[in-house]
Image (cartoon, helix red, strand yellow):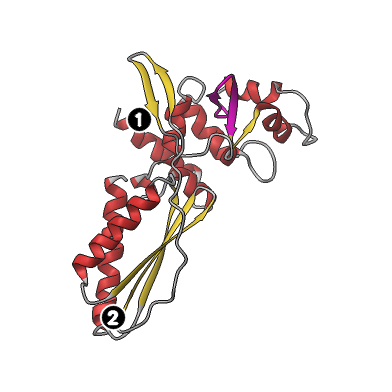
Amino acid sequence: MTAATAARLDRIIDGLVASYLASNGAAAVSKKVSFGAAPEAHDTLIRAYLLDKLSEASAQAQRRVEIERQGPLLSVRVTLEPASTTAAPTKSEPAPTPHRPVTIPTSAGPFEYTPPIDLHRDTVSAQEASSRLSRTGQSTSRTIAHERRKESKLLALKVANGFRFPTFQFDPRGGIHPLVERANMRLGAFNDPWGTLSWWFEDNDILDDMSPVAALAAGALDERLLDAALDDLTAGM
């Protein structure tokens, strides 16, 4: 969990506790916040962090933290309610399964990296990617996807003996989303695919602590913001 995520959680807690205290502890208060795309391994960390902080802030209230997911997108609902209120029973949730780490060869030697997406569930094969990129929406060739990969327009990840193409890159109207293509080319996705993937899924200060992929999914990303986020990355190098 990043420092930016922890700071955002602290702000949520401060606002929630202030509202609860304003009611003199007589009313339940709840807040739901979207964190955009985040690894499932973060679920347990975020839940534990919130419960611990809420316990420190308001020992007399009952506390609930509910994790909701839609694919890689994470939302959290936090609730404070009077201690006399009987909380509704909730079914236990299975512990999230972290994504499997992969070993990436680098100039400094092998590096173990845990990707922010499921490398099979959240990606498609070269053939399916080519079908999505073809004019007819049907293709039995892998050529189109690999051409875009070599141009850095389409991010592809080497998995086992083949390539997998993350699905967030495709425009629902067809083809590669123009903003994705723009960012991938500036990031050099062909030469640094794993670094490009990480950039898409990391919280970004320029985007109000949303990840670029979450901002894209929410329709909150445009060329100006994208370029500002990429310029900020370049400035820090």
Decide whether residue 155 is among the magenta residues. yes
**Tag 1: residue type?**
Thr
- Toward which corner of the image does residue 26 lie, by quadrant? bottom left
Rendered position, 23 above or below 193: below
Helix, strand or loop at label 2? It is: loop
Mark 2, mark 1: which one is toward the viewer?
Answer: 2
Q: Where is residue 232 in the image (x, y as percent from the top left)?
A: 34, 37
Q: Can residue 22 be seen in this view?
A: yes
How many C-alpha atoms fall within 10 Å of the one at disc 1: few (<14), some, or many (≥20)? few
Is the Cβ of the residue at disc 2 closer than 8 Å to that at disc 1?
no
- Toward which corner of the image does residue 77 lie, by quadrant? bottom left
Rendered position, 150 above or below 207: above
**Tag 2: residue type?**
Ala
Q: Position of residue 159 (x, y in %)?
A: 54, 25
Q: Where is residue 184 in the image (x, y as percent from the top left)?
A: 51, 30
Mark 2, residue position: 83
Helix, strand or loop at label 1? It is: helix
Q: Can residue 221 be seen in this view?
A: no
Report the residue at 44% width, 49% height from top: 96
Decide whether residue 166 is among the magenta residues. no
Magenta segment? 153-165
Q: Indicate the quadrant containing the C terminus: top left, top right, bottom left or bottom right.
A: top left
Mark 1, residue position: 234
Report the residue at 50% width, 26% height from top: 189
Report the Cα–Cα distance between label 2 and label 1: 50 Å
**Residue 60, which numbered label?**
none
Q: Where is residue 86 in the image (x, y as percent from the top left)?
A: 37, 81
Q: In this view, does 144 lie to the left or right of 31?
A: right
Pick whichever, 14 or 187, lies toward us: 14
* Marks 2 and 1, the one that precedes in the sequence: 2
